Image: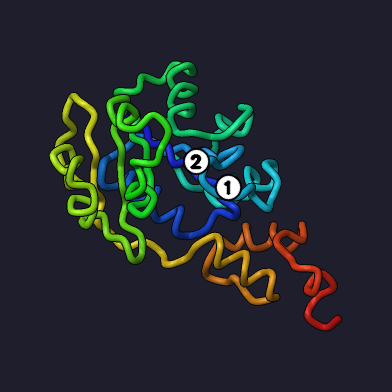
Amino acid sequence: MPHGFLGGTFDPIHLGHLDVARTAREMLKLDSVSFVPSNVPPHRRSPMASADDRFAMAGLAISGTPGFTVSRLDLDASGPSYTSGTLDRIAASGTPLNDVFFITGADAFRDIGLWKDYPGILDRCHFVAVSRPGCPASTLRAALPALSSRMMDAPGPVPSSPAIFLVNAPTAAVSSTEIRQRLAGGQSIAGLVPDAVATYIHDHGLYRSRSTEKGPDA
């Protein structure tokens, strides 16, 4: 059964993440998609929210969405959350890697050459690169010419050998960095995250700067 995995810091999870997962699932007819919050991101600073908070927010974001789950696969592992390690843990859980579609934004995939165990990692499972604002998936062939022969436009037939699927579709123009900045400045994040996530952030006082901790009327 084809199964998608979407890794990320999710600090916090937002509508762009959900669009990426939903579009990949629809275009490639995946049975399910697991969101895999990272423990220690290898290529960026440590998350501002705790592992438990990020896991909880991801769960709230997908609540009621058939086929979406949240996994602690990386959160319960020590050290940096490299994709190669994530794939090791997926395989150890009993999921055949030939059924795995590792989903990422096209902007992140553009830097695949910097990922641990590249290029061998691309021989372990299918990869799915979904368009993000400012980085359409269609641009990856020119950006990564050495990999262009392995790239396929989705939807399309799934080959027996690992491929790189390009999903050209609009996704919400929002980033976790923007959300954190807005929250630190006391601004609204309505329309950027699911309502349940916004409520959780507010109730737990996440991402506030010291100047906003007492509220806008302080």
Q: Quadrant of the N terminus?
A: top left
Of mark 1 and mark 2, the one earlier in the sequence is 2
Residue depicted at x 13% and y 39%: 149
Residue depicted at x 68% and y 62%: 199
Q: Residues within 10 Å of mark 1 (few under 14, many from 20)?
A: many
Along the line of sight, the residue nearer the viewer: 92 or 111 = 111
Taking 166 as reference, is 73 left or right?
Answer: right
Q: Can residue 158 be seen? A: yes
- Residue 69's place in the image compared with 92, above or below, is below
For the residues labelled 1 and 2, the Cα–Cα distance comes to 7 Å
Q: Which residue is mark 2?
A: 35
Q: Which residue is mark 1?
A: 58
* Residue 30 location (% of width, % of height): 32, 37
Q: Can residue 63 be seen? A: no
Mark 1 residue type: Ala
* Residue 92 location (% of width, % of height): 47, 16
Element assignment for label 1: helix
Mark 2 residue type: Phe
Q: Quadrant of residue 160?
A: top left
Question: In the rendered view, how is the structure colored?
Answer: rainbow
Please give the label number shown on residue 194.
none
* Residue 187 location (% of width, % of height): 65, 76
- Residue 138's place in the image compared with 158, above or below, is below
Along the line of sight, the residue nearer the viewer: 108 or 61 = 108
Residue depicted at x 32% and y 51%: 130
